[in-house]
Each structure stands twice: as C-alpha cells, then as structure tokens.
Image: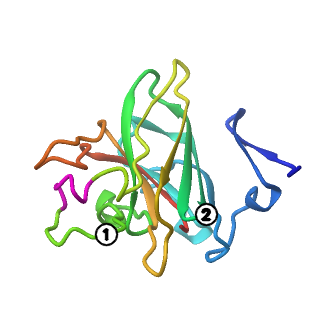
C-alpha cells in the first residue's frame, strides 16, 4: 500500500499525494507540483521565485493560495487544481497555458493544446475542448475554496505547458467562442 502525504493550503487539506510529489518535483520527473500564494505583479519577488500572480485583486486576493499537481498516468495526464481564499460561491474558468506566468496576464501565452489548431487564436471546438486542452473550471464554496481535477487522454512530450491560468468566467464551448473564458485574473507557474 502506498503511503500518502496530505498537502495543506491555508489550513485546507487539498489532496493526498505520494511523498515524492509532496515537494516540488524537478522537470522531467513526470510529476509537477506547485504550491504558492498569489501576489500582485508590483509586490511579486521574481528573484525568490514568485510562482503565482493575481491580476484582479477583487477576484483573487493577494495571499490566496493555489496548488497544482500534474501526474502522468498510463497514457493520460491527471491534473488537480486546488484554490483557497478566492471569492466565495463564484465560478471561474481555468486552463493549462503555454508558458510560465509573468507580470502581465498575457505572459503565459495561449492555451496549451495537444494538437495545435492551425488558426490562432483557437476558438474551434475541434481543437479548443477539454480532451485537447486541460480545462479546470471550478466553483468555490462558501469559504472560497475549490478542488477540481481533469484527465486528458495524452501525456506531454517535448512541448509542455508552463502554467495554469484562472479566468473570470466559465469556459465557453460553442463554435467561434470555444475555449474563451474572459479576462485572466490569476496565474500559477507549473513545470508540466
């Protein structure tokens, strides 16, 4: 039987993971773990590795917490997103994006797609969908917490995602709007 270690964010047990995943796992190990508190770009400390930014303090307060765990499972990738301290009873969109977070919301690039849409920005449901991208939309509880997971039927190869971006709205699925979820309100760098 595998021993599991609880990961705690802001007093909330967010998940139980194998001990090897309880600390930040190095790139290439197969497991990616990010545990961070959101900071505004003007208070971030890149020299000590700020990994989570809030771009809208009304929707994600500085100091709110985030955890992302991504694990390859057979021929799939399982991703868990846990947040604490966000606006209670509110729905957010969330997706894996191409690059790490930065001071500007656009620094994370577009959604990571397993099969890249040749027409960018991608709003075609044939490409912008939860099987080709990692979608982690969630609704917080009355204390501003949420835990959500997604499994995609592929694993990362040479081209990897670099972050999970939280958006102001639930993800649209209709043609011409597929994958859109409003402004980027937060970002957590993840070494997928």
**Disc 2 target residue:** 74
From the top left corner, tell me how far across and down residue 98 is, in percent.
37, 68
Instruction: Give SS at disc 1.
Output: loop
How many C-alpha atoms fall within 10 Å of the one at disc 1: few (<14), some, or many (≥20)?
few
The answer to which quarter of the image holds residue 181 is top left
Task: Tell me which residue sits at (41%, 54%) in the image.
Answer: 134
Instruction: Give SS at disc 2.
Output: loop
In-front residue for pair 134/39: 134
Task: Tell me which residue sits at (15%, 47%) in the image.
Answer: 177
Left or right position of 17 against 126: right
Left or right position of 121 against 87: left
Left or right position of 6 against 104: right
The answer to which quarter of the image holds residue 118 is bottom left
Q: Distance between the residues labelled 2 and 1?
A: 19 Å
**Disc 1 target residue:** 115
From the top left corner, tell me how far across and down residue 84 is, in percent.
57, 35
Q: Give the magenta range.
A: 122-128
Task: Tell me which residue sits at (46%, 72%) in the image.
Answer: 160
State yes or no: residue 47 in magenta.
Answer: no
From the top left corner, tell me how far across and down residue 188 is, in percent.
49, 55
How many C-alpha atoms fall within 10 Å of the one at disc 2: few (<14), some, or many (≥20)?
few
Residue 7, above or below 88 = below
Mark closer to the chain start, 2 or 1 = 2
């Amino acid at each position: 039987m595998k021993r599991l270690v609880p990961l705690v964010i802001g007093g909330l047990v967010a998940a139980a993971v194998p001990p090897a995943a309880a600390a930040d796992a190095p790139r290439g190990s197969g497991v990616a773990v990010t545990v961070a508190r959101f900071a505004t770009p003007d208070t971030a400390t890149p020299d000590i590795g700020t990994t989570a930014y809030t771009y809208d303090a009304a929707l994600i307060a500085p100091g709110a917490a985030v955890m992302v765990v991504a694990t390859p499972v057979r021929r799939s990738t399982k991703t868990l997103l846990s947040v604490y301290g966000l606006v209670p009873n509110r729905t957010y969109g969330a997706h894996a994006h191409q690059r790490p977070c930065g001071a500007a919301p656009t620094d994370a690039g577009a959604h990571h797609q397993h099969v890249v849409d040749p027409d960018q920005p991608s709003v075609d449901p044939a490409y912008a969908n939860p099987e080709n991208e990692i979608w982690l939309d969630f609704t917080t509880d009355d204390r501003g917490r949420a835990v959500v997971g997604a499994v995609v039927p592929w694993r990362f190869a040479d081209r990897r995602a670099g972050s999970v971006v939280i958006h102001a709205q639930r993800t649209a699925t209709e043609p011409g709007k597929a994958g859109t979820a409003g402004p980027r309100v937060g970002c957590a760098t993840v070494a997928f």
